[in-house]
């Protein structure tokens, strides 16, 4: 099991890979990718009971990325984990590549095709129900975005998951508080989220979405019997690159050559600093 | 006391049904429910998903007999389809059952993405489709569903005409490895096929041979085409009747044979004339260089007339008399 430091060091490489692939593809969701990357790092390297060898095992844990537009972060994490060769990512958004701008099952290890918002939670609910019907122990995880919560289908599923007491279902909110138009509170306010999800019958935990220990604890501590788990992961959009943090244009901004160079240099410097601190 | 539902048949049409030896069966809806219950009793992986629709889907008995194999989602059709997809992705043979009007409109994006694009073997069953809920108004009509679903890749679309076709369609769907949509109404159907008829998804059934006109119909309109063929025969005209139960993939061989061998082709459907079976048949014929005299009979693109299914059918010429007259007008 990797330590927090292992994950922190890995995150630099993952952020660099994600930025390079968005730059090379000429498309992608930079800000949201950087905000959810640490969540994915923890999920794939610590929490999910699935490996590249068990992608077809019915007993595996399932992860469905409801905020499918942040697939570039997922690509970087899954390539690092060995689901597919890193070189495949040089084809993202290319003609006839399976690696399109949202998850598809044609990519090894991807559970469902997502990209339209508000779809992941109902799908995961069905998966969690299947596990309960079969007495299977696998868990089901989805990642939601702030803006996505305006989709009514999430609330249909929120009701049903509690109704069916799906304690094997976990929804994580990448709570960076920004969406394409601006602050979520200005576009369509959704607070107080913790009270809303509790009122719907969920166990709610709020964590720092860039803190590996907090994320791990929240994701691995069993939910009280019968309750689905909602984790509000407070994150920073554009996390890790100074000029991208909390700047709306990086929702789907693609770094230019100099911007990429600057971002990579910042990440290199921060990595070096962390390594020195560890030493 | 409420007035009895108007009959789908005039006295002359009833007499013709008698002459053709057609016996009244039951609603396809009931056939579906019993078939699904039998299949699910034998296979615990078969699951029904309902949106407060187990009553209208005749699945109350299923719910009592197999309570662990039914998922109630409440009145939430988007959730119904998403859950069906998730169950199907985890090895369940899930049947999402909901009135066609809601299932194929409100949750169209879930059908497109979660079922078809994700390519999970989910089955969607549109009950009380077409104008089965005729008198309830256009909120409750599904006259758009075939058009929108035909435009989605990776979906087999079946519109069974009678109890036999319904039973076979549900059996086919239960073992299909790709997405399937089955759509029917709730009126009692005549049994249209003789014993020994075979059903194959994607393969139309030619029920009656003829060379003057071909009726290419599906669902609850097929019986009217068959009766019209009987009436035309009395007037010396031969009519081929094809039950085009599978809308996608289309049996182009049956369509082209009709276009080559018959002087006229009349398509009949309980659907808007836009984007349905008629246009699919027209495109098939024209692209093969065939241009028989041709008419699409369905619900025109207008504010749909009010009334029961029988009233609406009669109003738009989906009746023995109406279809025979349409055929004669082409000859």
Image: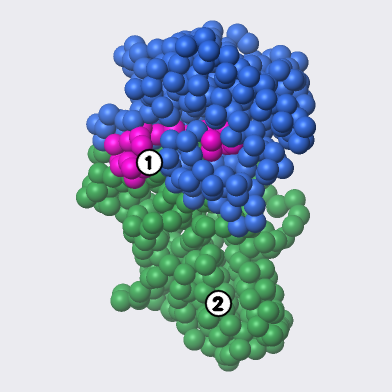
Chain colours: A blue, B green
Residue B116 drawn above or below residue B10: above
Question: How far apart are the alpha carbons under marks 1 and 2?
Answer: 43 Å
Given the image, what chain letter belongs to the residue carrying mark 2? B
Is B167 covered by the magenta stretch?
no
Tell which of B133 and B125 is nearer to you. Answer: B125
Give the quadrant of the N terminus of chain A.
top left
Q: Is residue A1 left or right of residue B101?
A: left
Q: Which residue is mark 2?
A: B252
Name which residue lies at 40% across and 34% down.
A62
Q: Position of residue A43 (x, y in %)?
A: 44, 25
Give the magenta-colored segment's residue range.
Answer: A50-76
Q: Position of residue B245 (x, y in %)?
A: 49, 67
Disc 2 crowd rating (10 Å Cα; few below 14, some 14-19, many 20+) is some
Disc 2 on helix, strand or loop? helix
Is A61 covered by the magenta stretch?
yes
Tell which of A94 and A233 is nearer to you. Answer: A94
Residue B138 appears in view: yes
Q: Is residue B111 left or right of residue B278?
A: left
Q: Is residue B63 left or right of residue A273?
A: left
Name which residue lies at 54% across and 70% down.
B250
Q: Position of residue B138 (x, y in %)?
A: 66, 45
Given the image, what chain letter belongs to the residue carrying mark 1? A
Residue B248 drawn above or below residue B152: below
Disc 1 on helix, strand or loop? helix
- Using the image, tell me which numbered label, if any, was put on residue B221: none
Tell which of A279 and B75 is nearer to you. Answer: A279
Residue B142 appears in view: no
Disc 1 crowd rating (10 Å Cα; few below 14, some 14-19, many 20+) is some
Q: Which residue is mark 1?
A: A52
Name which residue lies at 33% across and 42% down.
A53
Q: Position of residue A182 (x, y in %)?
A: 76, 21
**Eye-nearest disc, 1 or 2:** 1
């Amino acid at each position: 099991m990797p330590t927090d430091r292992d994950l922190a060091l890995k995150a630099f490489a993952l952020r660099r890979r994600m930025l390079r692939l968005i730059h090379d593809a000429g498309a992608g969701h930079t800000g949201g990718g950087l905000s959810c990357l640490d969540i994915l790092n923890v999920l794939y390297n610590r929490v999910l009971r699935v490996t590249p060898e068990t992608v077809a095992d019915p007993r595996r844990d399932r992860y469905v990325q409801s905020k499918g537009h942040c697939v570039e972060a997922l690509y970087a994490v899954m390539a690092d984990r060995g689901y597919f060769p890193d070189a495949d990512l040089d084809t993202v958004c290319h003609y006839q590549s399976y690696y399109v701008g949202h998850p598809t099952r044609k990519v090894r290890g991807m559970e469902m095709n997502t990209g339209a918002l508000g779809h992941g939670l109902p799908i995961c609910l069905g998966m969690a129900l299947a596990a309960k019907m079969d007495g299977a122990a696998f868990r089901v995880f989805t990642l939601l975005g702030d803006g996505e919560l305006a989709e009514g289908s999430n609330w249909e599923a929120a009701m049903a998951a509690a109704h069916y007491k799906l304690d094997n279902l976990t929804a994580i909110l990448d709570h960076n508080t920004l969406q394409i138009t601006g602050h979520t509170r200005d576009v369509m306010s959704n607070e107080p989220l913790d009270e809303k999800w509790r009122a719907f019958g969920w166990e709610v935990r709020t964590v720092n979405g860039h803190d590996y220990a907090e994320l791990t604890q929240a994701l691995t501590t069993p939910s009280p019997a019968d309750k689905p788990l909602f984790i509000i992961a407070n994150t920073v959009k554009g996390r890790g690159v100074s000029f991208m943090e909390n700047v709306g244009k990086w929702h789907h901004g693609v770094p230019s050559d100099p911007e990429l160079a600057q971002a990579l240099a910042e990440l290199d410097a921060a990595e070096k600093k962390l390594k020195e601190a560890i030493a | 006391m409420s007035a009895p539902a108007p009959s789908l048949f005039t006295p002359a049409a009833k007499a013709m049904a008698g002459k053709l030896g057609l016996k009244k069966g039951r609603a396809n809806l009931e056939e579906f429910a019993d078939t699904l219950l039998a299949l699910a009793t034998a296979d615990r992986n078969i699951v029904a998903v309902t949106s407060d629709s187990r009553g209208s889907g005749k699945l109350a008995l299923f719910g009592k007999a197999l309570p662990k194999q039914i998922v109630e989602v409440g009145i939430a059709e988007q959730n119904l389809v998403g859950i069906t997809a998730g169950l199907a992705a985890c090895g369940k043979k899930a049947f999402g059952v909901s009135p066609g009007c809601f299932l194929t409109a409100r949750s169209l994006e879930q059908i497109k993405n979660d079922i078809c694009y994700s390519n999970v073997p989910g089955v969607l069953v549109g009950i009380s489709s077409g104008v089965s809920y005729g008198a309830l108004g256009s909120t409750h009509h599904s006259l758009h569903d075939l058009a929108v679903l035909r435009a989605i890749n990776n979906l087999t679309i079946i519109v069974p005409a009678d109890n036999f076709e319904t039973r076979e369609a549900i059996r086919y769907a239960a073992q299909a490895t790709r997405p399937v949509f089955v759509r029917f109404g709730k009126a009692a159907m005549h049994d249209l096929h003789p014993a020994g008829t075979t059903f194959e998804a994607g393969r139309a059934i030619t029920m009656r041979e003829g060379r003057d006109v071909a009726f290419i119909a599906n669902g609850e309109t097929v019986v009217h085409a068959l009766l019209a063929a009987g009436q035309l025969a009395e007037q010396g005209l031969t009519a081929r009747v094809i039950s085009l139960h599978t809308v996608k993939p289309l049996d182009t061989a049956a369509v082209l044979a009709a276009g080559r061998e018959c002087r006229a082709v009349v398509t009949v459907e309980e659907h808007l004339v836009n984007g349905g079976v008629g246009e699919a048949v027209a495109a098939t014929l024209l692209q093969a260089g065939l241009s028989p005299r041709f008419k699409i009979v369905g619900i025109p693109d207008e504010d749909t007339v009010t009334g029961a299914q029988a009233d609406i059918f009669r109003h738009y010429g989906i009746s023995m008399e109406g279809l025979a007259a349409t055929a004669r007008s082409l000859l």
